[in-house]
Structures are given as C-alpha cells and as structure tokens.
Amino acid sequence: MTRCCGSFMKIQTAIVLPDIQSPFENKRSLKAIEKFMSTKRWDHLVYLGDFVDNFSIAKYNEGKPGLTEGKSILKELKHAESILGKKILNL
C-alpha cells in the first residue's frame, strides 16, 4: 500500500506488450511472456500498438499481388484469436 492524496492505494502491476504484429509475431518471445505471466502476480495486461499486422490489406502492398497471395484479413484475425485465446470476430 502507498499513501496518495490523503488515502491509501494498492499498488498494481501491469504487463505491457507493444506491437505483437500477428501473424508475424515472435513465437519464442510470446512463449517467454506466457511463462513469465504464469509465474508472476499481475493485475493488468495492456497491448500497445499493432496487435494484428493487417498485411493483407496494407496500403504499402497495393499493386504487389505476389506479396498478399493466399493471405486475407480474415486469416490474420483468426490467427490473432488463437494468440489471445478468445474470439475477436463475431462471424
């Protein structure tokens, strides 16, 4: 407990993860983070930046069909769901 503004507040711990970039995430790093999360006590999980890369619909890929062939935003979102362990799509 810490004192602030005349009252006591519980100190909370947050895990902050920037730019996952699914489906291009670093699987080794995510495994290490999952292990850390399972062994520590924490209150909040915060995702910063791009969780999904959106490679298949990115402006910088316009006119480059070879880069996006076989990829779709639906596949990217389903992959992100597998990382999160819960549905983000309502289809």
Image (tube, grey):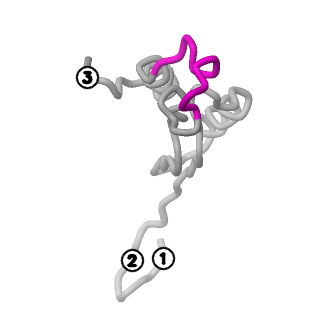
Which mark identifies residue 10?
none
Q: Position of residue 2 (x, y in %)?
A: 48, 76
- Of residues 55 and 7, which is closer to you in this image? 55
Q: Which residue has dot 1 on it? A: 2
Kindly identify the amino acid type of the residue bearing the numbered disc 2. Phe
- Of residues 20 and 34, which is closer to you in this image? 20
Kindly identify the amino acid type of the residue bearing the numbered disc 3. Asn
- Which residues are drawn in magenta? 61-72
- For the point 43% across and 67% down, the residue is 10
Q: Among all residues in the image, which is located at the extreme top? A: 70
Which mark identifies residue 90?
3
Q: Which residue has dot 2 on it? A: 8
Sequence-wise, which precedes: disc 3 or disc 1? 1
Q: Say which element carries label 2.
A: strand
Distance from disc 1 to disc 2, alpha carbons, whole Å, reads: 5 Å
Q: Residues within 10 Å of mark 2 (few under 14, many from 20)?
A: few
Q: Among all residues in the image, which is located at the extreme right? A: 28
Distance from disc 3 to disc 1, alpha carbons, whole Å, reads: 42 Å
User: In the picture, residue 66 is in which quadrant?
Assistant: top right
Q: Position of residue 65 (x, y in %)?
A: 58, 19
- For the point 51% across and 35% down, the residue is 58
Q: Nearer the viewer, mark 2 or mark 3?
A: 3
Q: Are marks 1 and 2 in contact (CB under 8 Å)?
A: yes
Q: Is residue 42 above or below residue 38?
A: below
Q: Left or right? Give the position of 60 relative to 76.
A: right
Sequence-wise, which precedes: disc 2 or disc 3? 2
Q: Quadrant of the C terminus?
A: top left
- For the point 35% across and 88% down, the residue is 6
Q: Are marks 3 and 1 in contact (CB under 8 Å)?
A: no
Distance from disc 2 to disc 3, alpha carbons, whole Å, reads: 42 Å
User: In the picture, residue 40 is in which quadrant?
Assistant: top right
Q: Say which element carries label 3.
A: loop
